[in-house]
Structures are given as C-alpha cells and as structure tokens.
Image (cartoon, rainbow, N blue to C red):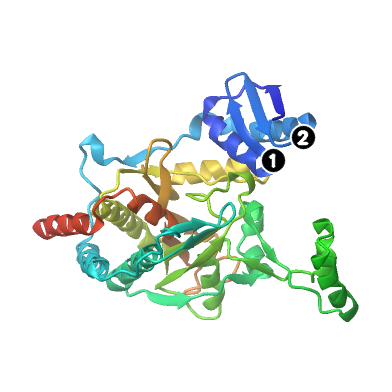
Amino acid sequence: MPTLSLPFALQENLWPTMRTRLRFHFPQIEHLDITATEVRLHSEEALSAAKVTSVVERVAASYTALSERLSSRVVYDPTDGTDAPAMNAEDATALRAAAVRLAADLDEVQTPSVEDLGEVQPRERGLNVYIGAGAYRLRVIDDFLRRFFEYAHGATEIRVPSMLPATVVDRAGYFDTGCQHLSFVAPVTTDMEEFEGFLPYWRADNDRDRLHEFLRTPADILNPALCLHAYPLVEHRPVDKLVLTLSGSCFRDESGNLNNRERLREFTMREGVFFGRQADLAPLHQRLVAVMAAIADLFGFKYQLVTATDIFFNDNAQEQLFSQLITDSKIEMLVQVEDGAPIAVASVNKHGQHFTKPFGLSDSDGETPSTMCLAFGLDRVILALDHIPDLPGQLRRSLARMERQA
C-alpha cells in the first residue's frame, strides 16, 4: 500500500477538520495519521504529494487563525451534576403524549426480519437498506418526533420530494456554504441519435468517463437539507408565525468520509422549522435545547449537548466558523454509541435571516422574519438505539419518571 509522509506542524484542534478534508478530496485514502509534525497517508494508489500539500496548506491557512477557538463548548452534560435544561410545561406534556404512543407502537407485533438479511444491510459505502424490524423502528421513531412537533407547536406536516431545483439551492446560499455535498440529477439524453447509442455503450462496459456524453444538463439537486423546501412554499404570503415539520431523504456526498454507520450518502431526517420574529424565536431556542436533552434522557442515551460548527470549504470559512461559535447558532446532541468518538444525533440551529432574506419573505408588518430548526438524523437515532438493550422498558421507566416530575 503506497504511503505518503509530509512534514507539517499542525495544532491538535485542527486534526479532525484536516482528516475530514483530506478524505473528501482523496477518497482513495485507506488510513491516515496526523501528529504535531507529520501527516502520513496510506492509500490504494499513489497520491500526488503536490496536491496533498496544496490541500493541507490551504486548510491550515484558513483554519489556523481560529484553531484555538474551534473547540466545542459543553452546554449540558448529565454526568456533571447540574440540572437539566428546564422544559416548558406544554413541551413536557406533548413529549409524554408522544412517548406513550411510541411505547405502544414498540409493543405491537413487529415485522420480523429475514434471518439471513438482518435488520440493516449495507449497499455500497454510504447506503443502507432497512429490513423488517429495522424499517419498523425507523418509521415509529419518525412518527414519535412528528407527533411531538404537532402536539407541542401545532406544526403542519409537509411531504417533500427527494430533489429540488438547483436555482432554489443556490438562492438558499447552499452553493456558498455546502457545495461539497451536492449531487446533481442528470437524466439520460432525449436526443434520438445519442439516446440510441447509450445502451450499446453501457452494455459494452466502456470507459465510464464518457457517461456524461449521454446525459442532459442537470437542473435539479438531490436534497442537501430538507428545510430548503420550506422557503419557496411561503415566499408569496405574509409569515408572522409558522411551524412546519418535514421528513424525508437527504443526500450528502462526503466522498472518502462515507461509511455505513453515521456517515451516509442518503439518510432520513425529521425536522421542525420555526418562522417568526427574532424576539419570539429567542426564548424558543432554549425550549428546543431542553427538548433535545429530554428526548436523549427518554431514550437513555449517554450524551452531551455541545456548541458545534459545520465544516466550510469556501474562502469565508473563518468568518462562518467564528460566527457559529460565538452565537451558539448550532447546538448538537452528541451520543456515545460505543468506544470511540460520539456521534451527532440531533441539533438546534439558529438561521437568523439567512434563508428568509434570499426568498424575500416578510411578515404582516413588512419585516423579514427569522427561522430556527430542530433536526434529528433518524438513521443515527436508530444506530444509537441499537445500544439500548431494552428500549420498551427504558421508555416505561422514563415515562414513570416524567409522571412523577409533572
């Protein structure tokens, strides 16, 4: 296996970001080691030292100025003896009601898994198939979260397709902040001559690099985030206060970072999206953080709530990272599922007017509203629940505790 060793002095806070970026740009990497003085890469094929050096230098230059401030801050840790974030009484009532329905769903006879197929079957890196009981759990957890958003906030559910126009994604700013994840949809050509040549080309198993010659120019993108569907829906009506809940597939190409656990190319999200004046959304933020902690406690997770940042690839990465950290605009639920790094299962995200301005949204006073969301990665929830030995029993114990505290 070819090995490439490059001398670089990198601060430890930068190592996770550097690993992610290198695996994205060089998916052929099998293993990599980063120390304070060296980056060592093991790959399926020889890597260009010049290209790797260029990526390391550009990432380091972009992030080093902030590296000492990039560490997450713990907002709440159940093991440190502090009180959990206080839940709103209405949220607590709604969560109990949704949890009672979930416990009943889990007690029902579940579709048995086919023994030799299991409950989750990997299909290529980053794609999973859920079978029998695995598919059942995914569905009832989604129903549980939907009911909470409906019971607590009167949310309106919307069902969305798996793709949306590229123009919408661009208007939402995703080309600037997350273009590395985008997957365009390119149908087969309708030109008669090219169309008739496609099947012989494909059956002959020729060089796949020519495939683009048989495809139309793509106009749509697979969902990089579900909430992007929400803004065009309301751009022609006043938005004073609105809560939507969405569930569906998201697609993010994370290249060499993909696996069949917490890094999937296609995954299912359940989101609650909140529109309103900033003054009204400010207290809602604490409510949603408390709900996130209460759901983690309900399931018996070992978790922390921490401030977090996304990984940005553009030239404004420093400003975006610093903005997320100082404003607590992203707070994640990190769940320990086994030995190793915890995984982010859910997050509360302050959008401000990031999405509403590009779509020209306004309230009845002509002011631009703000938005916020609480989002759960259902595949990661299921992964975390696999480590809870008796989920129905855990739910009953949690419900009894919630009743005593009511």
Circle 1 is placed at which residue position? Answer: 26
Circle 2 is placed at which residue position? Answer: 51
* Left or right: where 10 falls relative to 282: right
* Left or right: where 120 falls relative to 186: left
Q: Are marks 2 and 1 in contact (CB under 8 Å)?
A: yes
Q: Can you see residue 331?
A: no
Q: Quadrant of the C terminus?
A: bottom left
Which residue is located at x 80 percent, y 58 percent?
208
Cα gap from disc 2 to disc 1, whole angstroms? 10 Å
Q: Can you see residue 383?
A: yes
Neighbours of disc 1 within 10 Å: few (<14), some (14-19), many (20+): some
Of all residues, the one furthest to the left in this rendering is 404
- Residue 341 falls in image quadrant: top left
Q: Disc 1 residue type?
A: Phe
Which residue is located at x 29 percent, y 52 percent?
296
- Whichever of labels 2 and 1 marks the residue nearer the N terminus, that label is 1
Figure check: 17 above or below 333: above
Which residue is located at x 38 percent, y 36 percent?
339
Residue 182 placement (x, y as % from top left): 65, 58
Figure check: 161 above or below 130: below
